[in-house]
Amino acid sequence: IDSVIWRMAVAKATAIRQMTESMGGYIVSSYIYKSSYGDGLTADNASISVRVPAERLEEALEQIKADAVEVRSENVIGEDVTAQYVDLESRLRNLQAAEEQLMKIMDTAEKTEDVLAVYNQLVSVRGEIEMVRGQMKYYEESAAFSSITAELIPDAAAQPIEIAGWQPRGTVKAAVEALVRTLERLADAAIWLAI
């Protein structure tokens, strides 16, 4: 969800944080800042990124949108990383086989310079193995969790327009009340005339 308009952005950010934790997810980042909306009106905005279990993505999105005044945009993207993961598995097997071969060579090496050369290659291969395992773990976690980022903007536009103490909403209310009173008097007068 790219941007959602809320009446109280900070309160909703707290609610999203609690919802995420209750679902077994976690907070990636949270940022609260003030914005100006003309005539000296300032309000808190919030940006929050969370990760929720993939199977609860729809539920999380519905809860986030539940109290929204307006959802300005929503973008759900899925990415299939199966091919990349299979490539990493294959690369890992090859690196582990190379590690085993280097260990055998090291066990049979007799010269110090040969041992050092094999050791350096072994360190390099082990570094690559750790990198591949890290990428695989990242893909596994990406498949298990879905990422949601919400921009929470207060509904400053819903505030009544107030210019030097004048409120159009109050004027409309007074006009409607005066109209109803006038119609009541006219109806009363018509009844008197009819009798």
Image (tube, rainbow, N blue to C red):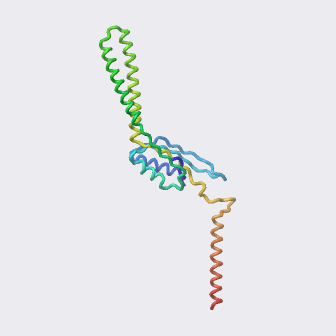
Compared to residue 91, the image places residue 56 above or below, namely below
Question: In the rendered view, does 168 fall on the left or right side of 47?
Answer: right
Compared to residue 132, the image places residue 67 above or below, namely below
Extreme-right residue of the structure: 164
Compared to residue 192, the image places residue 126 above or below, namely above
- Residue 69: image location, x then y, percent: 53, 56
The residue closer to the viewer here, 180 or 87, is: 87
The residue closer to the viewer here, 172 or 93, is: 93
- Residue 18: image location, x then y, percent: 43, 48
- Residue 58: image location, x then y, percent: 42, 50
Compared to residue 22, the image places residue 189 above or below, namely below
Give the residue drawn at x 64%, y 66%: 170
Extreme-bottom residue of the structure: 195
The residue closer to the viewer here, 88 or 40, is: 88
Extreme-front residue of the structure: 83
Give the residue drawn at x 61%, y 50%: 42
Query: The C terminus appears in which quarter of the rendering?
Result: bottom right
Give the residue drawn at x 64%, y 86%: 190
Please tell me in which quadrant of the rendered image residue 121 appears.
Answer: top left
Question: In the rendered view, does 143 fall on the left or right side of 172?
Answer: left
Question: In the rendered view, does 89 fall on the left or right side of 190?
Answer: left
Count the labels in the image.
0
- Residue 185: image location, x then y, percent: 65, 81
Question: In the rendered view, does 113 fall on the left or right side of 47?
Answer: left
